[in-house]
Image (cartoon, rainbow, N blue to C red):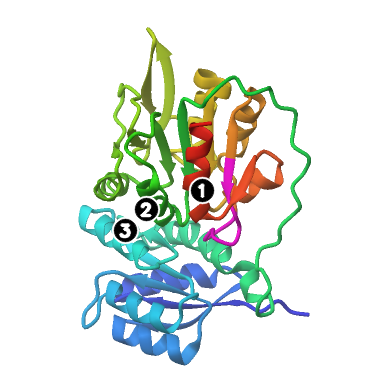
Amino acid sequence: MTTPKIRVLVVDDSALVRRLVTTALREAPDLEVVGVAADGVEAVEQVDALEPDVVTLDIEMPRLDGLGALTEIRERHPRLPVIMFSTLTERGAAATLEALSRGASDYVTKPSNTGRIADGITAIRDQLVPRIRALVGMRKLAPAGVRTAVSRPPTAPPARRAPVGRPEVLLIGCSTGGPDALARLLPKLPADLGVPVLVVQHMPPVFTTMLAERLDRSSPLTVREAADGDPVRAGEVLIAPGDHHVRLRSAAGSVRVVLDQGPQENFCRPAVDVLFRSAAEVYGGRALATVLTGMGQDGLEGARLLSAAGATIMAQDEETSVVWGMPGAVATAGLAHDVLPLDQLPARLLGALRA
């Protein structure tokens, strides 16, 4: 039996970008471009007419922009994956974060130089194709009402050291779907949380700055982008800046942030594994870590180290994750003490911190 192809609708007001995207997608044997649209009005009409499996949607367009089109698409098709196309600018970052808050599934950034066609096609293919596969994947093949991700049962937990006391730091790692998950989790943590919070969200520069500012406005905790040498303070949330790993270092009785641009890990910088690994060295079993929605398995190896040191680890469940890659990897490896829906995680984290 032939596996049905993933049907993609490409929406962008630039003929060049439409050409780049369609060419990149047609190189993937399991994808099919079923239509293109040049503005938001066309996009809404084409979604209704063509019933695609996924939409790539530009933000800045005439007649009806991407945000407006997304709102209308979501009203008609609440579960249709929509991937925004964004520019690496403050305006693009702000619009992308707004789109994610309105229900966009993910985003990709436009190539900075579309003058070299081959380079643009490669950049788009490398970003977009894995996201489409992750967001649609088994959903296209599963009957109605059947869970769409193939889940392995958790393995037996590996040997852990006994807990050494109340956690002294909260670590959070996330990727696809992470900005919305953070926007729902952090506001439910109180200002008197009593421990520092460090977050790795896979995002490029500028985007992480805007994300921190947005989260700071909605959270009782102080949220900002981390800077090299920052002291780690209770009640403060530090977001890893785009294109920089965040490590923790203990010296003279205090813990500080160290930023670097070392090699990517799991194709990411910042990488969750880097933060978790350094936290295992500094805090050992006195860390509490949670892995939220995200594609891939970044955070798995760091979680192994934390678990071996006696740290407590929690993961978001499959049902509430946009992509159950990162939390699924931790859960199926038997490393998670709890696998919970997103809305139950804040209370469970708070309970662990105050046990």
Instruction: Say which label, 2 or 3, has the lower sequence index.
Output: 3
Instruction: Say which label, 1 or 3, has the lower sequence index.
Output: 3
Q: Is residue 49 magenta?
A: no
Q: Residue at x 62, y 77 (%)?
A: 5
| Residue 39 visible in the current orientation | no
Q: In the shown orientation, is residue 306 left or right of residue 35?
A: right
Instruction: Say which label, 2 or 1, has the lower sequence index.
Output: 2
Q: Nearer the viewer, mark 2 or mark 3?
A: 2
Image x and y of residue 93, in percent: 28, 55
Q: In the shown orientation, is residue 96 left or right of residue 164?
A: left
Main secondary-structure element of the magenta-colored stretch? loop
Question: Which residue position is annotated with label 3?
Answer: 97
Question: Which residue position is annotated with label 1?
Answer: 345
Q: Nearer the viewer, residue 116 or 345?
A: 345
Q: How many marks?
A: 3
Q: Nearer the viewer, residue 343 or 71?
A: 343
Q: Secondary structure at mark 1?
A: helix
| Residue that extends furthest to the bottom in the rendered view of this protein | 49
